[in-house]
Amino acid sequence: MFKKQIQSYVPMNEQEVQDQKVILNYIKLFEHNILTRENEFAHLTSSGFILNEARDKVLMIYHNLYNSWAWTGGHADGEADLLAVAIKEAKEETGVTNIRPLSTEIMSLDILPVWGHMKKGKYVSSHQHLNVSYLLVGSEEDVLRIKEDENSNVGWIPVNEIETYCQEPQMIPIYQKLLQRATVL
C-alpha cells in the first residue's frame, strides 16, 4: 500500500525527485523492516501538518528532542497505512480528537536526519527518517493537551509566523511546501 502511494507521488521539486528515488530504493532493499525501528539506519515515518478550517493557523508542538516548534508525526512501527499513522500521532501529540485529512494523498516526501540522542535511558544512534507527510485539518474548539514524554507545549500558530517559532531552519522549506500544496486543495 505505502510503496504504491510513494511510487505514484508526483514530486514538487528536485529534492523530492531525489528523495523519492532513495526512499523507493530503501523500501526495495529493506522491505522486511523498513516500517520498524529495527532498521536502525533508516525507517519510514509519517507526519501531519495540521491546519485549522480557515487554513490560516497550523497546530504545532514544542518538540522536546529538537527544542523547536514542529509538526506532529512519528514512526510507522509496523503500520503500513501511513495516513493512519499521521492522524494517530497528531491526536496523541496534541490532544485534538477532531482531526481529518485535507487530502488522503501524500503531500510531501523528505529524508530527515535524526542525530544521536538519549531516549528512555537508551542511546539511539543517528539515522534517517524516510518521511511522508499529509495535510490534516483540526478543530480549534478541541482542548489542547501536552504529551509530556515528547513535547512541552501545543499551540495554534499563524501560518505567517512559522519561521518565528521554528528553530529548525531545514524544516522551513518543508512547511512552506506544505502550505503551498494546501492553497491548491
Image (cartoon, rainbow, N blue to C red):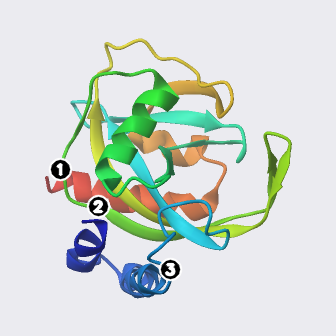
Name the mark on residue 113. Answer: none
* Residue drawn where x is 71% and y is 38% of the image: 64
Q: Position of residue 127 (x, y in %)?
A: 68, 69
Q: Which residue is mark 1?
A: 103
> What is the spatial separation of the Cα atoms under label 2 and label 1, in whole angstroms?
8 Å
Whether residue 55 sits left or right of residue 88 in the image: it is left
Which residue type carries mark 3?
Phe
Contact (CB < 8 A) between labels 2 and 1? yes
Task: Report the residue marked by disc 3.
Answer: 30
27 with respect to 166 (left or right): left
Callouts 2 and 3 close, C-beta under 8 Å: no
Looking at the rendered structure, the number of numbered marks drawn on it comes to: 3
Q: Which residue is mark 2?
A: 107
Q: Which is nearer the N-term, disc 2 or disc 3?
A: 3
Give amino acid for label 1. Ser
Answer whether labels 1 and 3 touch (C-beta < 8 Å).
no
Left or right for 13, reference 115: left
For the point 47% across and 17% down, which residue is it?
Answer: 144
Query: Dot 3: what SS?
Result: loop
The residue lying toward the viewer, choosing from 163 and 112, is 112
| Distance Cα–Cα, label 2 vs label 3 | 23 Å
